[in-house]
Amino acid sequence: GEDGPNGGWLERLEAALDASGAIETILQDISSLYAVAREYLVLREIFLVRYSALAGHQRALPSHRDSNWFSFVVALNSTASFEGGGTCLRDAPPICVPAGCCLTFVGAQRHAAAAVTGGTRFVLAGFVDLRAPLRTRALCTRQMHAIDPRFVCSSCRAFRRPYLRANVRFLERCAGGGRRGRALLELIASRRLATAADLDLTPIEEACRRHLAGEGTALDPLMSKFVARVLERG
C-alpha cells in the first residue's frame, strides 16, 4: 500500500506514470471501451502487488469483486520471470499481458489472480470509481445485469484520494482557465469548482479553506497531501 514498506517506491512510480501520461491514457481507454464519459471517471487507488511462488508469500488471489466500477492491472515484469499467474475474468482462462501493458476490466464482476507456480509476478493494480449522474449509472447497471445479475451498483459520491496526481489534474481541467496552485485552492474553497462528475467535494473544500486561513497544520495527513500536491503544480 501507499503507506506500507513499498510506499516510497509506489510514490516514485506514480510520479513517473503521471509524467508519461500513462494513467491518463488508461482512464481514456476505459472511457472509450465502456462508453463512459472521461469526466465521470475518478482514480480511487493504485497499489503494488507481488505474487511469488516462494514459501510464505502470496501466490494467488481468490475470486472476488472489487467495490469500484472499473479496475486495471499493469504488468511490471516479463512473463518470462514467472510461471502460472495471470488475471482470470469470470470463467475465462488466465490473461497475462506483456510487461508495460495494461489489462482493464469491470472490477465489480468476479475475477481472480491465478497462482504463480514459479518465480515472481509484479503488477500495479488500480481502482477507478464511476461518479456519473444517476441516469448514467442506471444505464450502466442495466448493461451489467445482462451479463451478471448479481452485480450491485455503488451510489457512493466519495472522492477517496483527491491527492493522486491524476485527480489533481482532473480538478485543474474542471477549473479551466489554467487555474493551478493557490488559484485552484481558492476556487475550491469558494465552492465555485464545477465538475460533471457526481462527487462530494465537501472535504477538500474545507481543507482548502483551512489552509488559506492559515490552519494547514491542523489538516489530517491525506488532506495535507492533497493541498501540497495542488501547490507543487502551481
Image (cartoon, grey):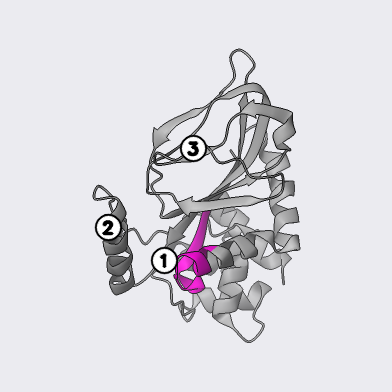
Measure how far apart labels 3 and 2 are at the Cα level: 21 Å
Q: Residues within 10 Å of mark 1 (few under 14, many from 20)?
A: some
N-terminal of the two: label 3 or label 2? 3
- Give the vertical position of 83 relative to 159 (above or below): above
The image position of residue 171, as x and y in percent, is 56, 72
Q: Is residue 44 left or right of residue 13?
A: left
Measure how far apart labels 2 and 1 are at the Cα level: 35 Å
- Residue that badge 3 annotates: 93
Local secondary structure at mark 2: helix
Residue located at (41% from left, 44% from top) = 66
- Residue that badge 1 annotates: 202
Q: Which residues are magenta?
A: 30-44
- Give the vertical position of 110 relative to 42 (above or below): above
Residue located at (43% from left, 49% from top) = 107
Q: In the rendered structure, which amino acid carries the disc numbered 1?
A: Thr
Q: In the rendered structure, which amino acid carries the disc numbered 2?
A: Ala
- Residue that badge 2 annotates: 146
